[in-house]
Amino acid sequence: MYHTKTSSFPKDFLWGASTSAYQVEGASLLDGKGPSCQDVKQIPEGTSDLTVCVDHYHRYKEDIALMAEMGFKAYRFSISWSRILPEGTGKVNQKGIDFYHNLIDTCLSYGIEPIVTMFHFDMPAALDDRGSWSNRDSITWFSDYAKLLFETYGKKVKYWLTINEQNMLTLVGPVIGTLRMPENCKNILKETYQQNHHMLVAQAKAMALCHEMLPEAKIGPAPNISLVYAASCKPEDVLAAQNFNAVRNWLYLDMAVYGEYNHQVWAWLKEHDACPEVTDEDKQILKQGRADYIGFNYYNTATVESCGHIELKENQQVDQQSGLIEPGMYTHYRNPNLSKTQFGWEIDPIGFRATIREMYSRYRLPMLVTENGLGAYDTLEDGKVHDTYRIQYLKDHIEQMQLAISDGCEMLGYCPWSAIDLISTHEGIVKRYGFIYVDRDEFDLKTLNRYRKDSFFWYQKVIKTNGDDLTIE
Ligand code: BGP
């Protein structure tokens, strides 16, 4: 659809950016924080550990002041479960509670809306030892944690997000450093989707609880949603794209919005004797948990073609955005129409518009972009970082988001990844995403001083003009 006139961004559009606790905070075992699965995982070779990160824990005031200087209307960050409940359940760590009060208060003092992710890839290690999401008790652990968050921060926080990228935890858990398989597990697919089921029920419980305890607040999921294209117009490829769309995207949103399993995914699991056990109580809880909005991370689209019952190669290279294969369902396909980042992720701004349109057609809920951005090698020279490539990426995506708004889609805000440089999920500090550069290397912490990148000033202008001026100087 071509528009002769595009709609403006809504007046109260939430321009901001995102981080997550285990990637930005550091202080990983300080002031009573218990270890999370991220602190005890095997760190990918050649990359930094997570003990200091960019030391947001000690420098959050300076960081939020810089966000305010950019004009942020919102800051999406996550709460570290094991910082406030070191064992995951039971005894509360007051210093952890205070830290997030201070962080939230600092945001509010600048008129920045805190958007809180309750769980971003960092299961308390103590709960990992009790089986993590494979243990049905995880539903209660999570809802008790949610209750504590609502009681503690409910007066100050209006926007809540449940579980970051639950779909990626399920599809590529080992890459992220999560998802525990019990020893001698015979049916890995069934076990994986049982864990996924526990997360879904836990999420629904948290949503229902939020509505009950904080009627004014809004809560939503935060999956990684990428529209899946068919590699060709061969009908078999179209079916493959539908398969992957269902497994990757709609399973999670059908559940968050309608409280129901996606029928295609259910049929596929049944075929593999892998349906999770669902109790009557689960069904009721799932129906009670309703999202008020859809938070979603978008990096690029995926493209697949059909595939028969092929053998999987060992050590197949996969991550959140690339490489997934499911015999009999779909296999990934390199889209020749798209360029790639320095780290091999495809770039598809038009796919962003297509993804938003598709989601709105299916769910009719307002949407908040909780991540989107370019990971690149940045260079600091004379206190400056000329990251025109990042500005271009963000500009292209914002333009497409505006076109999606012009198509009639309802958008609440845009929080790209990331507000400030932080440690990548599995590629260290060198894969930088921030508007703010942090002076440190992979293993040398250097000064940890902050520098405004060129994208900082560009985004400042974008926010000031409410998205009207996206020009690159
Ligand atoms: C998402 C995660 C983030 C972040 C981002 C970039 O999947 O929610 O935590 O890490 O991807 O990924 P990476 O760090 O692998 O480049």
Image: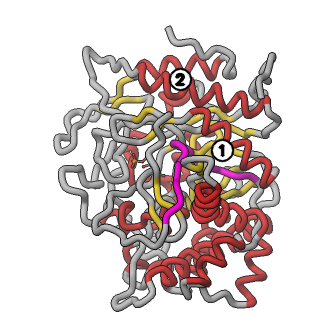
Instruction: Compute the Cα span from label 2 to label 1.
Output: 31 Å
| Residue at the disc numbered 1 | 355
Query: Along the line of sight, which residue is nearer the eye, 94 or 271?
Result: 271
Residue 94: tell me if it is visible.
no
Q: Amino acid at mark 2?
A: Glu
Q: Is residue 347 above or below residue 23?
A: above
Residue at the spot x=80%, y=68% of the render? 212
Q: Quadrant of residue 188?
A: bottom left
Q: From the viewer's perspective, is 283 left or right of 21? A: right
Q: Quadrant of residue 15?
A: top right
**Residue 433 % position (x, y):** 41, 36
* Residue under pointer 2: 69
Spot occupied by residue 247 in the image (x, y as percentages of width and height): 59, 65
Q: Is residue 49 rendered magenta in the image? A: no
Q: Residues within 10 Å of mark 1 (few under 14, many from 20)?
A: many
Which mark lies nearer to you, 2 or 1? 1
Q: Closer to the N terminus: mark 2 or mark 1?
A: 2
In this picture, is 129 found above or below 364? below
State which region is magenta: 293-307
